[in-house]
Amino acid sequence: MQEQIYKNEGVSRRGFLKMMGVGAATMALASCGVKKEQETTVKRGEGTMTYRTNPNTGDVVSLLGYGMMRLPTIQVGDAENPRQEIDQESVNELVDYAIEHGINYFDTSPAYCQGRSETATGIALSRHPRDKYFIATKMSNFSPDTWPREKSIEMFEHSLQALQTDYIDYMLLHSVGGGGMDNFNTRYIDNGILDYLQEQKEQGRIRNLGFSYHGDIEVFDTLLRWMDEGRLHWDFVQIQLNYVDWKHAKQANPRNTDAEYLYGELVRRDIPAVIMEPLLGGRLANVSSPIAAKMKQRRPDDSVASWAFRYAGTPADVLTVLSGMTYMEHLQENLATYSPLELITADEDEFLQRIALEYLDNKIIICNTCDYCMPCPYGLDIPGIFTHYNKCINNDNVPRDTRDPRYAAARRAFLVGYDRAIDKSRQADRCISCGECVTHCPQSIDIPKELRLIADYTQALRRGKA
């Protein structure tokens, strides 16, 4: 399969390595493109899912992984006290369809869906034989009240109970890097929790131990250096990788590190990479109209999102690419992209790097809609506000000049869409800048500042003066 793809596209293996930004000399020809022994396709229902093999355990893992962060919900309660609960019936249906069509990696966390994801995931998966799927979850001890050793252990035990399993296939230290080494030491070293998790691995209650990374590069480099020194072994690492962050992560967010570097460091150590944010929280599925038109011109039958998913799955040391698929149509579309995967070519890579720069020129808010900032103590719909603002930027409906011929239409689109998408009691002008949300944001967005800017802009639009 590998050699045929290279032959068809006229790209040598060495050229393909160079295309992905990983020099052959540096990487010892280890890791971009697809290794014959690493990639297989297996018939599942209507398609052939692409699989990668974990070199540490021999696990044959679906290249498309199911992220259980954005599960479908239904409204319950009465009109005066409505609330959202996970739609378990829909979750079961999605998981059943995913497994039937070859997905076997399911990623959750105690922090997802305001603490309800693990339970919903456990209910859905426990209806299938345990050897048909891999469970990934996390030590999500962000809050100071979870830092004491007994509280973090309690979190791990609760994960096992909620997921209805005796062992975790892929266990992560969650979102290391935020807060630097001091925060990492407090969460995992000073309380002995990293030692505890290694003990659980020795006992078979954890099969693979790794970490997910956001933020301070010192933490990432330190944890890999510990492996070089023989202090511990990382079985896998989860990083943010997409065609924008490959070379331009710092331009998008000064706090982040280019995926080219992160992936390269993992390849040098033969650590499989699990990919998060292939769509940047959905933003790469909702690019501006001019960018979408260019993508459609090149591949008329493909969705905008499929470009990003193909890109994230192309490097050979990627074990699985996570996608939070809330709706059946998202699941079916992503299954089509990975059943089987068609590798990004050298020409397409050059095209996407140009697209990345054009995308960055839009200056959108770098929200990945992870919901870590929620619930807001004052009821604001923070991800919803940012999503609407970004959508209007992409659709050129953020008017700045009353002399613009499109001003009236764009003004109306922004304001009407805003009031329809976000209840007025949850809009940006309700923010009191308490800062409760800031410490939870993995992208380090100054959320109160952005909300003030949107509130001021919206007020000016309402007066017809923006």
Image (tube, grey):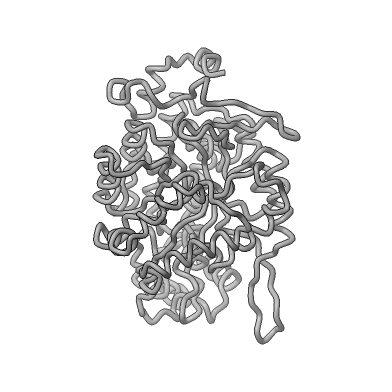
What is the quadrant of the C terminus in the image? bottom left
Where residue 202 sits in the image (x, y, percent)?
Answer: 44, 47
Query: Which is nearer the eye, 456 or 369?
Result: 369
Where residue 171 sits in the image (x, y, percent)?
Answer: 47, 51
Residue 234 seen by the camera: yes
What is the quadrant of the N terminus in the image? top right
Residue 417 appears left or right of 151: right
Query: Which is nearer the eye, 290 or 164?
Result: 164
Residue at 62% x, 29% y is 340
On screen, 132 above or below 405?
Answer: above
Query: Which is nearer the eye, 47 or 452?
Result: 47
Residue at 57% x, 76% y is 423
Residue 268 appears left or right of 130: left
Residue 380 appears left or right of 195: right
Where residue 60 sits in the image (x, y, percent)?
Answer: 57, 33
On screen, 284 above or below 187?
Answer: above
Q: Residue furthest bottom?
A: 80
On screen, 69 above or below 384?
Answer: above
Where residue 285 sits in the image (x, y, percent)?
Answer: 54, 47
